[in-house]
Image (cartoon, grey):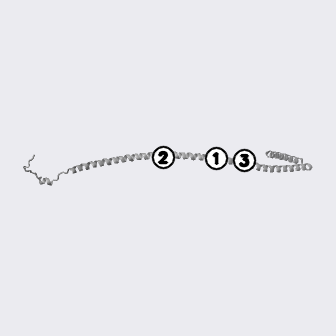
Amino acid sequence: MMSASAPVTVQMPDVSELTMPQPDPLVEALSLFASESSGIAARIRELERSHLERMETAAAKLRDQIAAHLQNQHRAEFQSGIQVLREEFEARLRLATAQWEAERQSLSNEIEDLRRHSNSSKLAQEVEQTEAALEALQKKIQAMLDDPTVELSRVMQENARQQQLQAYLNGLKFNV
C-alpha cells in the first residue's frame, strides 16, 4: 500500500515514444477482416460461377428434352393428320370411283340403246330397201319369163340373184 506521505513519481513517456505511432489494434483486425471477406467474396464468386454453369447445363439438357418431346409430339400429330387425310382421300376416291363406274355403266347402256335404235332404224331401212329390190327383181323375172325372146340363161342368172337377195333379207330379219 502506498502511504500518503510517499511522494508519487510519475514517469513521463519519452518524446520518441510519443512521436512513434503505436500499432492500432483495430487496423490489424480490419486488415484480417478485409482479407477474410476477400476470401469469402472469392469463394462466393466461385460458387456463383459453378452454380451458373450447373444451371446452364441443366437448362440446356432440359431444353434438349423439351425439344425432343415436342418433336415427337409434332411427329405423332403430323402422322395422325396424314392418316386422317389419307383416309379422307381414300373415301373420296372410293366414292368418285363408284360414281364414275355408275356413270360409265349408264353411258354404256345409253350407247348400247343408241346402237340398237340406230342399227334398228338402219336395219329396218335396209330391210325395206331389200324387200323393194326383191319385189322388183321378181317382177323383172316374171316379165322375162313372159317374153319369149329372153334367153333362159339370163332368167337363171336373175333367179340366182333373187335367191341371194332372199338369203340377205333373211339375215337382216334375223338381226331385227
Q: Which mark is residue 20?
A: none
Disc 1 target residue: 95
Mark toward the viewer: 1 or 3: 1
Neighbours of disc 3 within 10 Å: few (<14), some (14-19), many (20+) = few
Residue at 43% across, 46% down? 62
Residue at 44% across, 46% down? 64
The amino acid at mark 1 is Leu
Q: Tell me the SS state at disc 2.
A: helix
| Residue 150 makes an appearance in the image | no
Q: Tell me the SS state at disc 1.
A: helix
Give x and y (percent) for residue 13.
12, 52
Give x and y (percent) for residue 53.
37, 47
The amino acid at mark 2 is Gln
Looking at marks 2 and 1 on the same chain, the residue that comes earlier in the sequence is marked by 2
Give x and y (percent) for residue 114.
74, 50
Disc 2 target residue: 71
Looking at marks 3 and 2 on the same chain, the residue that comes earlier in the sequence is marked by 2
| Residue 169 makes an appearance in the image | yes
Residue at 45% across, 46% down? 66
Residue at 29% across, 47% down? 40
Q: Which mark is residue 109?
A: 3
Looking at marks 1 and 3 on the same chain, the residue that comes earlier in the sequence is marked by 1
Disc 1 to disc 3, how far (Cα)?
A: 21 Å
Mark toward the viewer: 3 or 2: 2
